Amino acid sequence: MELVQILALLLFVCVCACLMAGFPVSFTLGGTSLIFAGLSWLLGVFDFDFLGFVPNRIYGTMTNEVLIAVPLFVFMGVMLERSKVAEELLNTMGALFGRLRGGLGISVCVVGALLAASTGIVGATVVTMGLLSLPTMLKRGYDPKLACGTICASGTLGQIIPPSIVLVILGDQISNAYQQAQLKLGNFAPDPVSVGDLFAGALIPGMIMVTLYIGYTIFVGIVRPSAAPPIPRDAGDDSMSAGALFYRAVKALVAPIVLIVAVLGSILAGIATPTEAAAVGAIGATLLGGLRLRPDNPWPIFAAFAGLVGALFLSAFVDLRLGRGNTTSLQSVGIVVAAICCLAIAWGVAESLWRVRRAGTLNEVMQSTTKISAMVFGIVIGAALFSLVFRGLKGDDMVHEFLNNLPGGPAGAMIMVMLLIFVMGFFLDFIEIMFVVVPIVAPILLLMGINPVWLGIMIAVNLQTSFLTPPFGFALFYLRGVAPPEVSTGDIYRGIIPFVGLQVVMLGVLAAFPNLTLWLPKLVYGTVAQ
C-alpha cells in the first residue's frame, strides 16, 4: 500500500475515533483534515491547491436553496413541539385504541408517524412520548421492554417519513454524488435528482415501517397478553359517548394532518419546492402555536389558514406573475385574490407571533432553531474540507478500487456499504455518517448503475437504526433521561432489539423490491434518474 493511501486510511480512522471520543463534529472534520493536509504536504504527497476549493464550497453551501429548508423544517418542528400537539394526539389516540390488546402501543406508533410527518425531530418526539405515554403504559401493566422499544422506535420515524431533515440533507448529498458520477460517465446533461424525489420515494417505505411496528405490537398482544393488556372498561372514560370521542379525535387530528397535506402535498403536486413547502410548514406551525395559546380568538388564525390554502391553490392553477403585458382577466382577478390571501396570512402570522412571544415560547423556538441549524451548517463546512483532503490523498480512488474488486459486483458493493453504515451507526450520529461516509461511497455506487433514489432511501432506512443501536443510540439516551426510576437501562436496550430487527427486514424488503421506492416518484414526476 502506498504512503498516500495509508494517510487517507488514517485520516478516515482518526476522524471516526475523534467523533466517538465526543469531540464536536464540525471541528473534528475540519481540524483533523487540516492536520493531515499539512502532514501530507510535508511528506510531499498532497497538493495544497485542493484547499483552494474550500471558499467555493462554502459559498455554494450558502447559496444552496435546498439547504435553506433545514432551518425552516427545524423551526416548524420545534414550534409544533412547544404547542402541545403531541400531548393532545397521545391522549386522543390512547382513548381510541386503549381497549385493544396492545392498544396503547398502537397509539404510540400512530402518533409517532403523525409527529414524524409534521415535526421530524427525533429528540422532541421521544422525550414527549416518554413523558406522556411511558408512565401510562407501565401503570396499565405493559412490559417495560415493549413500552420502551415502541416509544424509541416510533420516535425515529421522523428520519424516514417525509418531510424529514435527514432526507433534505441526504437529497443534497445524493444529488451532488449523482452529478459527479454522470460527469465521469460523459453525461453532461443528466436528469436531476431532487429532494422531492426522495420524499416521494420514502413515503411508501415509511408507511410500511409504521405497519411493521403496529403489527409487531399486535402480535405481542396476542402471543403474550400480559405484556400488552387492554385498558379495562372501568379505567376508561365511559362517560364519553362514541360521537364525542370521534369528535375529539377529529379535532386532535385536523391540525397536524392539514399541515402534513399542505407541506408534503404541495411538494408531490409540484406546487412548491421542498424549500417553499418548508416555509409553508413554518408558517402553519406558527399559526397552530398561536391558536393553541389563545383558542378563544381564532379568527385571525382561521383567516391566515384560509389565505394559505387559497394562495397555494391559486399558484397551482393561475399565472400570478406581475409586470406582464398580456395578463388575462382571470389572471388579474387571481392576482388580486392572491394579494388578499397574503394580507390574511400576514395578519394571522403577526397575531400568532405576538401570542407566542408573550407566552415566552418564541425565544425558545428561535434559540433551538439557531443552535440546530448552526450545527448542521458547521458540519457541512467541515465535511467539505474533509472531502477535499480525502480526495487529495486519493482516498476516493482507493475506495473505488476496493468496492469494484468485491465479489458480486454492484450487489456486493451495496451490501458492504450497508453493512459499514449499520456498524458505524453503533458509534456515530446519523449526521456524522451522512457527511463522512455518503460523499465517499455514493459516487462510486452510482457509477455502478445503482438508482440514486433507491440508494438514498436505503441509506435513510439504514441511518434510522443509528438512533436505536447501543451504546450511542440517541433515542435510547433521550428516553433514559425521562424514564421513571423503575425502568432500567437494560429494559430500554433489550426493548429496541425487535425494532432494529424490523428495520433490517425493511432493508431486505427494499432490496428485493426496489419499486417500493421508485413507483411513486415515477407516478408523480414521470421519470426517475437512472
Image (cartoon, rainbow, N blue to C red):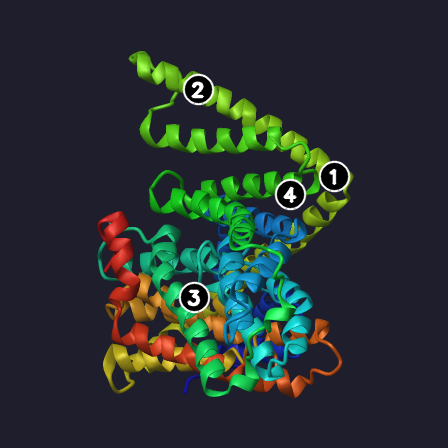
- The label number, if any, that marks residue 337 in the structure image: 2
Residue 289, quarter of the rendered image: top right
Q: Would you name the residue on which mark 1 appears? A: 357
Residue 225 location (% of width, % of height): 52, 84
Q: Residue at x 29, y 82 (%)?
A: 412
Name the residue type under label 3: Pro
Q: Would you name the residue on which mark 3 appears? A: 439
Inter-mark Cα distance, 1 to 4: 10 Å
SS type, badge 2: helix
Inter-mark Cα distance, 2 to 3: 46 Å
Name the mark nearer the viewer: 1 or 4.
4
Circle 4 Cα neighbour tier, 10 Å, few/some/many (<14 / 14–19 / ≥20)? many
Residue 256 location (% of width, % of height): 52, 49
Q: Would you name the residue on which mark 4 appears? A: 289
Q: Residue at x 55, y 68 (%)?
A: 98
- The tag earlier along the polypeptide, 3 or 4, is 4
Name the mark nearer the viewer: 1 or 3.
1
SS type, badge 1: helix
